[in-house]
Amino acid sequence: MLSFTFQYKLKPSQAQATQIDEWLEICCQVYNWNNCERKDWLRARKNDVNSCSLVKEYIIFPETKFPNYNVQAVNLTQAKKENPKLKKVQSQVLQSTLKRLDKAWTDFFEKKRKRGLPRYKQPNQFRSFIYPQIKESDFEGNKVRLPKIGWVKFKKSREFPVGLTPKQLRVVKKAVGYFIQIIFVNKEDVPDIMPGKTSLGIDAGISSFIATSDGELIEIPLFVKKAASKLQSLQRKLKHKIKGSNNWLKLQKRIAKLHFVVTSRRTDWLFKLAHKLCDRADNIFVENLDFRGWQKGLFGKQINNSAIGKFINQILPMVCFKRGVYYSKVDKNYTSQICPQCSTNTGKKSLSQRVHRCNCGVVMNRDIAAAKVIQQRGHNAVGHTVKEIACGGDATGVQLQLNLVSSR
């Protein structure tokens, strides 16, 4: 199944904005109340019957089942009869809030995910709610119909994708206003992209953003570095403000707006860079890296500011899929030590050593040499190109996939 998420700026009236804020507050209260119910159930079974606390203890009958989603959904129906405030919010929105809490608890119980106990949400931390079902008839030009809120205008910055149907809608409150995120789906199976003739290796650098196997070093944008310096200055001022005061709140809003602007500009630059790379080759190969370890190292701040992990693992593969470019990850071990010319191991290099030198006479930038090694490993993994078949043209299914996603 093919799915895409489109985001648009919402332009509600003052009354609609007030209603959205009220819904967010009610959803936050429902989330916290049901989260408390689950935690109380755990605390009631924390100790044995013969070793209860002498001061206080949570007492819940032993036959009481764990309040999972099904139990809490039934309780929510009863609570709406007793509390008229809950009737203001559409029923499916409240149910999606319970599903959001249930997913957090599912991740907590699964040992593989290693998530902590779900925390209570502060009002400023609960910023979105979901309409799990949406129809094409709910859209009319630059307006969207939100149940129990009405028709709301939005800035239609791009057209909806052709061949995909809207399935779900999320209303999000951000520092610069309100947004809607629409999920479009297509249930048809899309064939896998086949390898092509030309290839490009990409190495995630430290001194530069990335290095390509054709000899280009792409630097981190200057606006990211300037914004990091400005954020550091504002956060230093925030440290000396009284928490919760008006000046503290004003400075918090300035910081949040700056974060939003930088994130939007950086994401736009990353998407344009991904399209630029897809123009160069039919295959793109990258290292199979875990950037979570990089974030904890010496260059953690630089890694977070540049969003290299988001680019390699999310944006680049998505753009490659849209453009019909083959994307694959290769083994990351010893890419900076092996010579791309003679394939000999030149030994481990220090971080300060930015030039690759080999006895075969090759002298080049360290990151570019690593990108060439990545390109060679990608060729070895693919084996041979199959996009061009004997009868000419593209392999079966590739053009169908391009047609499905060409509207994005």
Image: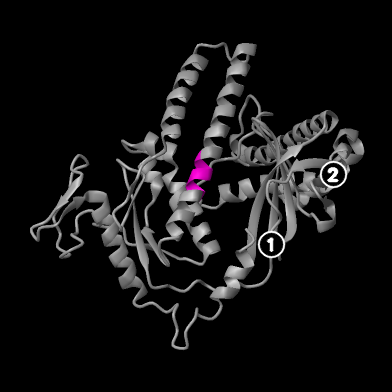
Residue 264 placement (x, y as % from top left):
56, 39
Q: Look at the image and tell me whether residue 64 can be seen.
A: no
Q: Quick one: which residue is furthest to the left in this view?
A: 359
Amino acid under label 1?
Answer: Val
For the stretch drawn in magenta, what is the main secondary structure? helix
Q: Residue at x 73, y 53 (%)?
A: 168
Q: Residue at x 72, y 46 (%)?
A: 156
Q: In the image, what residue occupies the spot 79% across and 44% down?
A: 94
Please tell me how many numbered marks the rendered image carries.
2
Q: Is residue 157 left or right of residue 201?
A: right
Query: In the figure, is residue 283 to the left or right of 78?
Result: left
Residue 257 visible at all: yes
Q: Is residue 347 left or right of residue 184?
A: left
Q: Mark 2 sits on what residue?
A: 90
Dot 1 crowding, Cα within 10 Å, few <14, some 14–19, many 20+: some
| Element on which disc 1 rests | strand
**99 or 142: nearer the viewer:** 142
Task: From the top left corner, tell me how far across and down residue 353 is, in percent.
Answer: 18, 43
Residue 332 at x, y percent in the picture = 31, 57
> Foreground residue, 39 or 50?
39
Q: Residue at x 28, y 66 (%)?
A: 376
Judge whether residue 105 is colored magenta.
no
Placement of the N terminus among the 4 image quadrants: bottom right
- Distance, label 1 to label 2, CA atoms, is 23 Å
Q: Which residues are magenta?
A: 266-271
The x, y position of residue 188, in whole percent, is 66, 72
Mark 1 or mark 2, which is nearer to you? 1
Q: Tell me, for residue 185, which label it has, or none.
A: 1
